[in-house]
Amino acid sequence: MQADQAKVLIVEDEISIRKFIAINLHRNNFEVLEAEDGETGLEMAKTFTPDVVILDVMLPSMDGFEVCMQIRRLMPQIVIIMLTAKGEDMDKIMGLDLGADDYMVKPFNPLELIARIRANLRKLPGPPPAKTNCIFFRRLMLDLEGQHFYKSGREIELTPTEFAIMKVFLSNPKKAFSRNEIMNGVWGRNYFGDLKTVDVHIRRIREKLEEDPSAPRWIETVWGVGYRLKGEGSTYKYQE
């Protein structure tokens, strides 16, 4: 998706921060919506279906974690970027566990926020190709056109970030990827984020994919390197 076509909802109760973000988004050709509390933000997300939600953790009436969880359950394709207080590592981890795609720590550079929005938007599906395009590996299938992921014929709901990570793995099965390589492949080489973000997303994928996430049989940890998709089988693309 092109950034100048994107609609961004800012859910932030501090008006100075909200307006600061809105001004910079407008300058970069985003369509901007604003909400001052969690309940309003959730209703606006349902009504206007934005492409991106910038979501503060500390909100009146309904906190950002609850808003994040409900948006992700109802609208899995929306990109969610959470705003956390400086040094609050548990807020970051909890937000990612509940379905956020990314986070920013206050105070932040607005140019970095714009860069992160664009990096996450690149993971969203563009116009569908003329032909069906799928990647198969053993009992897994990744539908690149419809943005669907299946295991043994059963669809597993993935967020845009999780889908992009699985595309990296399925395109290169049995190859060990470092966290840097996964981050570069999913977010882009100009993205500077915390590598722990990769670990959180991998854990979330395992919870959906593995029979026993504590003993993964699909995505294994390669000590000293990172992760790889393991197992016997072949990978190929199918076009009809």
Image (cartoon, rainbow, N blue to C red):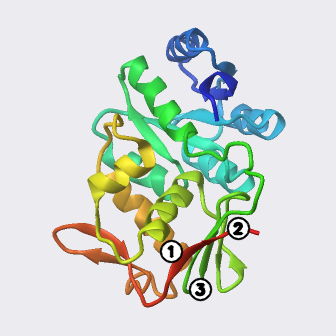
Q: Is residue 201 visible?
A: yes
Q: Nearer the viewer, residue 109 or 153?
A: 153
The amino acid type found where label 1 is placed reads Glu
The amino acid type found where label 3 is placed reads Arg
Q: CA distance from mark 1 to mark 3?
A: 17 Å
Q: CA distance from mark 1 to mark 2?
A: 30 Å
Q: Is residue 57 visible?
A: no
Q: Nearer the viewer, residue 32 or 141?
A: 141
Residue identifier under label 2: 239
Residue 225 is situated, as x and y percent measured from the top left of the image, at: 20, 67
The amino acid type found where label 2 is placed reads Gln
Q: What secondary structure is found at the residue carrying circle 3? A: loop
Residue 161 is situated, as x and y percent measured from the top left of the image, at: 52, 53
Mark 1 vs 2, N-terminal side = 1
Residue in the image at 48% along x and 36% along y: 119
Residue located farthest toward the bottom when viewing the structure as drawn: 232
Rendered image: mark on residue 139 = 3
Mark 3 vs 2, N-terminal side = 3
Quarter of the image holding residue 73? bottom right
Mark 1 vs 3, N-terminal side = 3
Q: What secondary structure is found at the residue carrying circle 2? A: loop
Q: What secondary structure is found at the residue carrying circle 1? A: helix
Quarter of the image holding residue 45? top right
Residue in the image at 36% along x and 23% along y: 108
Residue identifier under label 1: 207
Camera-nearest label, 1 or 3: 3
Residue in the image at 45% along x and 61% along y: 168
